[in-house]
Amino acid sequence: MTQKKRARPPSFKALPKALTGIQGLDEITGGGLPSGRPTLVSGGAGSGKTMFGLEFLVRGATQYDEPGVFISFEETLPDLAKNAASLGFDLDGLVAQKKLFMDHVRISRSEIAETGEYDLDGLFIRIADAIQRVGAKRIVLDTIEALFGELPNPGILRAEIRRLFGWLKDKGLTTVITAERDRPDKLTRHGIEEFVSDCVIVLDHRIREEISTRRLRIVKYRGSTHGTNEYPFLIDEHGISVLPISSLGLDHAAPATRISTGIDRLDGMMGGKGFYRGSSILMSGTSGTGKTSVAAHFVDAACRRGERCLYFAFEESPKQIVRNMRSIGIDLEPWLRKGLLQFHAARPTYAGIEEVLLVTHKHIASFKPNVVVVDPITNLLTVSTLNEVRSMLTRLVDFLKTLEITALFASLTAADGFLEANEADISSLMDTWLLLKAIEVGGERNRAMYVLKSRGMEHSNQIREFVLTNDGLRLLDVYLGPEGVLTGSARVSQEGREKAAGTSRRQHLEGRGRELDRKREIFEARMTMLRAEFQVEEELIQQSISESKLLDKELLQDRGQMVRSREADASAYRKNGSAPVARPR
Amino acid sequence: MAAVTRTKRARPRTQTALLTPRRPKLWKLKLYVAGQSPKSIRAFANLNVLCEKHLQGRYQIEVIDLLEHPHMARGDQIVAVPTLVVKLPQAVRKIIGDLSDTDRVLVGLALQQVG
């Protein structure tokens, strides 16, 4: 079992259940078939009843250590072994290991004559012997009603079959009884459902619009909750897998880690970190908007991180995708060789939608990828209605979330303008919605991208133009002009204009700068000149000051000598006091 | 192997008129039963009476109790009990029930035409 089991409903305790190991069935029955009790599996010819029984036993023997007994009333043992081998089961091996016992009850009406009262003790003894040989916990009676065709006296048979079921119940065997359903109003041909009160499962194989689908429904499950829908199922080389349309709960984990989109600027548009791990991303766009290229970037980035990628291509062949992506500089070939990347390409029209999604499911379960790309989901609409696609996608998204797989769903939208309305239904399942748009301006078509929604993270509200170059996809800012968003040539010419304007502005600025420098030089030159003149003047002035001081001094000295020489006049001179007298001491 | 084995040898062939070339000279009859149930006992008793009357001295009855030899049910494909298994030259016949309907037993043994 690769599928993770969900929490079982509380009634699990009340009624012990035996896990079937059949993918998906244990989920919708909340833990398997009623343990130690009979379950009726009814269906038309070729509906997979025998396969159901075989897988129930094989899984029981190999996975749950519950040996089993298969009592076939129709097919011979070599035929059964051959059929089982087509599901990958080795019956002979299990028989050799004493984990399984097979018995073919073959009776032919032509050799039987009834001559009075009889009972089925012969069968009871055979079954008891078989059970004892392997210590069986499980038993399958494959179309016990075949006995009605071979043995006379249906009254006795009915009573004996009823006794058999009761006896198996007393022995505590988990029993699967298959029965042919030939009329829609009856579960079994001979009404043996009356004797099986615990669990009834109906298998159906129908053809609708030339596409065959198998469906399974639990009609009754006493004492247990169970899904009541019709569930599509598939029989392939790994056995049966049932897909519940809607899962029982929304209890998946929500990792907070982020992973890169593979495009730097797209990461940037989502808070710089990219998608949440385990989230589901819808990427929609009209044809030729570059969905596959974006997906390839995402895949490439994941492989670079060493993660496993599973790419479901519903439109192109893997080789074509690899070739085309090489033209934008992404080489997926090494990842394919390393086994990190796996492609699954198929047109959904080869089978019904259930089958496509079941196959998807199975590949995911076996490859165990970290990243899944479905390109595009819209192709599924060609084989089914929007409603069905939605219900199956719900299932797929839930499944992926349970396994914490990040999924990118490409969606091709019609180019009629109603881009978003068409997918409103599907988008509610998705955590992130990238919209790729073709913008037609000035006679050309350019690509633009924006993040329409992204749950639980900051994201840019900007439209970005993206161009596919030889080395990958590049996101560019778009120009918002009076005519709206500018892309492509319009953007290039706008860029050109802006560049020219920029150059002239720069030149202007440089000119002003040079002018300033010149002025500063002039200013500084003048300053130097003035300072030089000033220094000259200062020196002259200082010189004249000191000269005049010297002169004063000499004058005074001369005067003192004169006074000394003319002593008589000294007092008169003092009375006047008109001039300071500097007497040498 | 068998719980009860009775063999009666044929007397000198005075009754050969009864025999056609398609019938065996010695009737080997195997009666499968499950324990000593009333049906089993009844079937054995009925078989004895019938053989004594129609096949005197030319039959051999082997009674197999499946409770003792459960695996033997598989070999002869026994589902119902009691079952009388007769190997006729052209086919194997299984006569089920307590053998109380003598006419049908005789038809089954090809000793009597239908009707």
Image (tube, coloured by chain):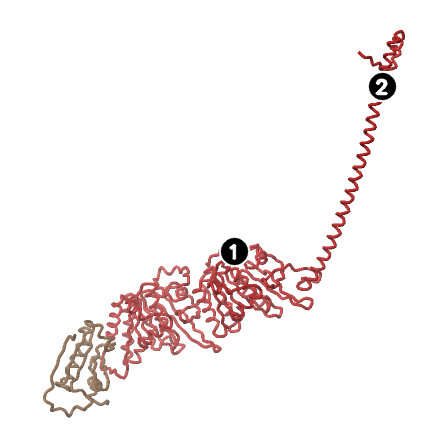
| In-front residue for pair B114/A350 | A350
Quadrant (top left, top right, bottom left, bottom right) of the N terminus of chain A: bottom left
Do callouts 2 and 1 mark residues in contact (Cβ within 8 Å)?
no
| In-front residue for pair A54/A390 | A54
| In-front residue for pair A38/A100 | A100
Q: Give the chain of mark 1.
A: A
Q: Residue at x 74, y 52 (%)?
A: A507
- Earlier-in-chain disc, 2 versus 1: 1
Place residue A577 in its image quadrant.
top right
The mark total stands at 2
Task: Tell me what hue chain A is rendered in.
Answer: red
Mark 2: which secondary structure? helix
Q: Position of residue A134 (x, y in %)?
A: 27, 67
Horizontal relation, residue B68 to residue A212: left or right: left
Mark 1: which secondary structure? strand
Residue A521, label in figure: none
User: Which residue is identified by label 1?
Assistant: A258
Place residue A21 in its image quadrant.
bottom left
Task: Tell me what hue chain B is rendered in.
Answer: brown
Residue A552, label in figure: 2
Q: Position of residue A96 (x, y in %)?
A: 28, 69
The answer to whether one can see residue A398 in this image is: no
Between disc 2 and disc 1, the foreground one is 2
Callout 2 crowding tier (Cα within 10 Å): few <14, some 14–19, many ≥20: few
Horizontal relation, residue A249 to residue A70: left or right: right
Q: Position of residue B82 (x, y in %)?
A: 21, 77
Q: Position of residue A29 (x, y in %)?
A: 39, 65
Q: As displayed, is residue A319 above or below residue A406?
A: below
Quadrant (top left, top right, bottom left, bottom right) of the C terminus of chain A: top right
